[in-house]
Image: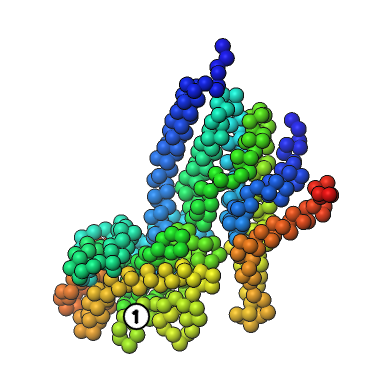
Amino acid sequence: MDKSIFKNPFFKANPITVLVLGICSALAVTVQLKGACVMALSVTVVTGFSSMLVSSIRNSIPNRVRIIVQLVIVAMFVILVDELLKAYAYDVSKQLSVYIGLIITNCIIMGRIEAFALGKKPFPSLVDGLANGMGYGMVLVIIAFIRELFGSGTLFGLQIIPQGWYMANGGFYENNGLVILPPMALIIVGGIIWVQRAIQKELQEE
Amino acid sequence: MKLNTNSNIYTIFYTTLLVVIVAGVLAFASTALKPKQQENIALEKMQSLLRTARLGEHASAQENKSEHIKALYSMHMTNDFVLNHEGKVIEGEAFEIDLKAQYNIIKQIAAAKTPEAAQALREQLQLPVFVCTIGEKVLNIFPCYGAGLWGPVWGYIAVEDDFETIYGAVFDHKGETPGLGAEIAHPSFYNRFVGKKLSKEGVFKSISIVKGGGQADNPNGVDAISGGTITSQSLEQAIAMWLNEYQPYFNIKRAAIGSDTCCGDEFCGEAHNNDQNGKEPCNGEGCGRKNENRNPEGHEHQTK
């Protein structure tokens, strides 16, 4: 199997920074690292398994209703993930609230199924789905790291910026309120895209 | 023979089969996971109630979180009961009361056109009260529930036995904006309520949540959340609305403190149905039901 199926989604064809898919949730769930990690994991599981399942029944799907069939399959995995989180990771599931359910609207999943899984064998589809989920998750974690550190002074809920630095305690530091708001996430995404294109010259348009 | 996957019959058959299979899988998952999910919800409620009394704050760090919370709960939550609109104890299981249904009744009371209609609605109210005992301290915990910006917000407020001072509060929400309105569920917000007063010059006054309202010399206000104005206002309304319905009970208890016949010294803490018989502890309804669970050694578990 071609190794690039696994490698591309991380850099060359990253869903967020190159394909610009899944931006919406990247803005919504990246206030805290913990939420971003669970979201990344959930999306990875859903893209991976729905790609595999669609790929394994791809020859039997009636062409006229293929989008709705894909949607039903994706929805099934999303609901399963949601129910599992509610049962075994209740705190996180509450924190992510509606965004788990909204994974179904994440363009990455339908995009990968349409572009890849419908034409390839199940195993490469699974790898492609998982890799795309991880590529998405990687960007999510980078954004959440920046936002949680500068917005709340914590990482995974642990205080990183010393309490004594804060103005309230007589220091010089204040958390940046803008970083918590979604617009800043978009600016960070822009920054990541800039850095990536500066490194990978072949991505630069003429 | 090769199937024609584009024929109408095939399409209908295929989609029907697919939907039935998916529905089956989901129904199975939902049924299998339901008990676990409901346990989580009950556990969360227990934890919220304990947190108002500033207990179990480190529960998440415990190895067995659910056991830890259950143990603390049975140790400290010595009683619970349901009140009617007059502040009298009625039949019912306080833990099982659906706050949303009560909220709808309270909302209808406010919107009722005639006083009679409001009174008829008021008689349907079932108001839960939880009693928490920490050593000599008896706390009454009252719930609140209201509509936030995106979904419901709710919480519990623990009031000391002077029925005036707030000992602690906890709030939660369904889907407020993370980082903004969602901050109401964070200790840095709800700990602002500690020590605030629910009265001004002897008259009931709820807590106002306003910008710059949290000065130490203002006993009736706390600071709102910047960027979470609507959530702050909704929460303020919810607290005022609910505590207002509890006022008959507050008045009964305050009167009892005044006449010095309350058995508060014995940290009985239940409602007396207004019929205190002298100093005998636990003479009210529903009292003693849970008191045997109380473990005196548990007092060392108080949090600092």
Residue at image position (61%, 44%) is A107
Neighbourhood count class around disc 1 (C-alpha, 10 Å): few under 14, some 14–19, many 20 upward = some
**Looking at the image, is A98 positioned above or below residue B221?**
above
Give the image quarter of residue B254. bottom left
Where residue B155 appears, as percent x and y from the top left, is: 40, 66
**Looking at the image, is B282 positioned above or below residue B35?**
below
Where residue B70 appears, as percent x and y from the top left, is: 39, 58
Relative placement, left or right, of A71 versus B45 is: right
Relative placement, left or right, of B233 versus B133 is: right
Chain of the residue on which disc 1 is drawn:
B
**Looking at the image, is B6 positioned above or below residue A172?**
above
Give the image quarter of residue A128. top right
> Which of B300 and A50 lies nearest the eye of the viewer?
A50
Residue at image position (33%, 88%) is B201
Q: Which structural element holds mark 1?
A: loop
Is residue A48 among the parts visible in the rendering? yes
**Looking at the image, is B192 positioned above or below residue A196?**
below
> In the current view of this chain or complex, which residue is farthest to the top?
B1
Residue at image position (83%, 46%) is A202
Q: What is the basis of the colouring in this image?
A: rainbow
Where residue B118 appears, as percent x and y from the top left, is: 22, 67
Where is mark 1, residue-wise? B205
Residue at image position (35%, 66%) is B143
**Image quadrant containing the N terminus of chain A:** top right
